Image: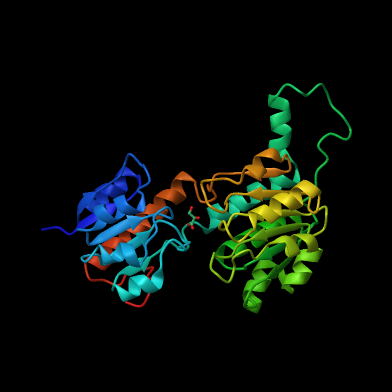
Amino acid sequence: MKPKVLVTREVFEEVLEYLSQYFEVTSNQSDITFDSETLASKLSDKQGAMITLTDRIDTPLLARCPNLKAVCNIAVGYNNIDLQACTNARVMATNTPGVLDDTTGDFAWTLILATARRLTEAEAYLRDGQWVGWKLKQFLGLDVHHATLGIFGLGRIGQVVARRATGFEMNVIYHDVRRATPEVEGVCQASFVSKDELLSQSDIVTVHVPYSSATHHLIGKRELEQMKPTAILINASRGGVVDDSALIEALRSGTIAGAGLDVFENEPKLNPGFLELKNVVLAPHIASSSRATRYKMALLAAQNLVAVLTGEKPPNLLNPA
Ligand code: DGY
């Protein structure tokens, strides 16, 4: 008898075919997000699950899944999983690091350029039929070239963003809980500074830290007030790292010039304040969403699941085996 696994959201058919070689697969190609009750009931007789950041894995859920051995996130971020609860329940948790760094870094740059040059605001104006001709002072933006780029978190994705800055001949500074090695600083051409220095010196602040209680509201009212009024803020990491209400107020009052956001508190419910603002570029959590990368993420999650349920150590184990 093949082990039973659940795939909680729509994935590529090729990935389902791969899983079917090993498992009896229950999939959810209709892609309707399971509420916690549905997730628990569907998972109650399964040995493994491929999940996404929309699935919360915690003690009450695990208590209802006595056969469960693996939860494999199709994401590098794993703040949807209570790791301690998994360890207590002897469930292995995995994520998908590495395969999405370039694509996510590219998207951070998409937001940087679109926000600095006010692209979505200008496009909306044009689509609305308001454009009557060239004007010298139309949609004046922020120059990215030779600007100072401040990166919070010089991990894998932060490093990609830093390396891309070379082409724009930027001054790159970063802050992290741990200083990077001289090799990494050299490749990234990035200088370590304090949090306060980063905020006050940067023209563009971009955030690339995982979400945790330590990074909750890393950027709030105080931090926004430390930024230059001409500066922009980019977040393609996780909602909750930035205090959305404080950001809306800062964008409204001109404390900072703009923001480019791929992630939000309480996704997918957007704070309506964002929709009233022109100086914010908004995206629905798609930074890693190129076809190639989302495929690699799903396949890596599937490989982690196969490894656990065939008695191998999974390549991306998050908690003690
Ligand atoms: C991740 O991998 O954590 C991304 O946010 C998923 O899109």
Tell me the colour scheme of the image: rainbow
Residue 173's quadrant in the figure?
A: bottom right
Q: Residue furthest right?
A: 136
Disc count in the image?
Answer: 0
In the rendered image, the quadrant that contains the N terminus is bottom left
> 298 or 182: which is nearer to us?
298
Task: Tell me if 6 is positioned left or right of 264 in this view.
Answer: left
User: Measured from the top left, where is residue 88 in percent x and y?
Assistant: 32, 76
> 30 or 220: which is nearer to us?
220
Residue 252 in view in this figure: yes
Residue 122's quadrant in the figure?
A: top right
Residue in view at x 75 percent, y 67 percent: 198
Residue 318 in view in this figure: no
User: Measured from the top left, where is residue 143 in percent x and y?
Assistant: 80, 49
User: Measured from the top left, where is residue 204 in percent x and y?
Assistant: 74, 56
User: Measured from the top left, where is residue 243 in percent x and y?
Assistant: 64, 58
Residue in view at x 30 percent, y 43 percent: 13
> 107 or 34: which is nearer to us?
34
Task: Tell me if 258 is positioned left or right of 268 in this view.
Answer: right
> 260 or 300: which is nearer to us?
260
In the rendered image, the quadrant that contains the C terminus is bottom left
Task: Tell me if 208 is positioned left or right of 8 in this view.
Answer: right
Is residue 177 shown above or below 298? below
